[in-house]
Image (tube, rainbow, N blue to C red):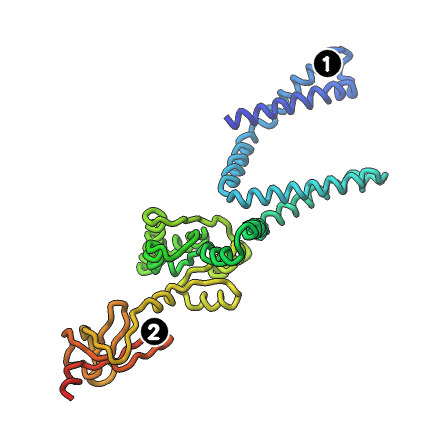
Amino acid sequence: MLKKIVHLFFLIAGGTIGYLYIPEIIKLLNFTDAKWAASPYLGLILGAIIIFLVTYWIADYIVEFLRWTEDTLIKVPVGDLLFGSLGLIIGLVVAYLVNISLKDIEIQLVSQVIPIFLTFFLGYIGFQVGFKRRDEFLNLLMMNRKERDRRKTDDTDTSSEDIQSKPKILDTSVIIDGRIADICQTSFLEGTIVIPEFVLGELQHIADSSDVLKRNRGRRGLDVLNRIQKEIAVNVEIYEGDFEEIQEVDSKLIKLAKVINGVVVTNDFNLNKVCDFQGVHVLNINDLANAVKPVVLPGEELMVQVIKDGKEQNQGIAYLDDGTMIVVEEGRNYIGKTIEVLITSVLQTSAGRMIFAKPKLLEKAQ
């Protein structure tokens, strides 16, 4: 169908050219004195036939180009297309206004050539500005909308609600970790869960890795996203934009958080520090896990199972349900047994919390 439309276009174009110019060419060259030879209708038929035959073989290339253009435009996110088109329109309007004043100049170069150049140049600049600064424009619109909503409600209530309802942007590490799905299920995270398309791309790249461990981690991350989207009652949005001038995914996450005024959710220690340095709100799943660990104080008694030897002589190692390590002094003889221990001290380190204890049987013996 598209090929027929292209052929029809060339027939109409050829007929129009023949109608306007072939009679004049015949008169100019004096091919014949017959009046019918200079008829515009004959020129219309000849022009249509000539142009159709000349362009018949390039119609397939034109159709392929049109289909490629169509597929490209379909894949472009709506926001990119919208702001790019608005920028193009503004650039063309500015070029038109400038060209009006140039038409009065009698110099042919200025009045005819420069307007064409300005039209293409300003149209291109307008499109590029609209396309590449789309995120900033969108953020500006969102900020204006939030400002209007803030004026309609109480300042104190709105500020607290605004912090809670900020979009939560998930990074690759927290998705692969998997605990974010359980946190979403408990409704501790409020607001929209944003999954950037470039994070999805990185997950897919990891899932396609030749390394078995990486491939399993990537597939687990994709399974976690499917669970969040299909099984958990939270609002999930896919951010289709990208920051082509930025290469690293972590830097793109920070840029996105600034653009949409969102919060980065991660368990990456280094990303956490960079976000803090750049003034971006961040939620660290590891910090949350440490915060909800049960509090154990010296003097308390616990039932634990001694798993293995410790580093020092006669030490045994046990673990709480949350993974916290317990060093049991004189616990080597109780490996494989469940015993009651008495907490002697609790040490908080950068790697986590470590608990020191000793068997209660030894305490009674003393």
- Where residue 31 sits: x, y (%)? 75, 17
Left or right relative to 63: residue 334: left
Comparing 293 with 31, the one in front is 293
* Label 2 – label 1 distance at C-alpha: 95 Å
Which residue is situated farthest in the front direction here? Answer: 154
- Compared with 354, 204 (above or below) is above
Q: Mark 1 falls on what kind of element?
A: loop
Q: Is residue 247 visible?
A: no
Q: Residues within 10 Å of mark 2 (few under 14, many from 20)?
A: few
Instruction: Give the amino acid at mark 2.
Output: Gly
Instruction: Give the amino acid at mark 1.
Output: Ser
Comparing 9 with 338, the one in front is 338
- Where residue 98 sits: x, y (%)? 76, 42
- Do the residues bearing badges 2 and 1 touch, measured as CB atoms within 8 Å? no
Which residue is situated farthest in the right direction here? Answer: 106
Q: Mark 2 falls on what kind of element?
A: strand
- Where residue 327 sits: x, y (%)? 24, 79
Which residue position holds label 1? 39
Which residue position holds label 2? 352
Nearer the observer: mark 2 or 1; the answer is 2
Comparing 115 with 349, the one in front is 349
Q: How many marks?
A: 2
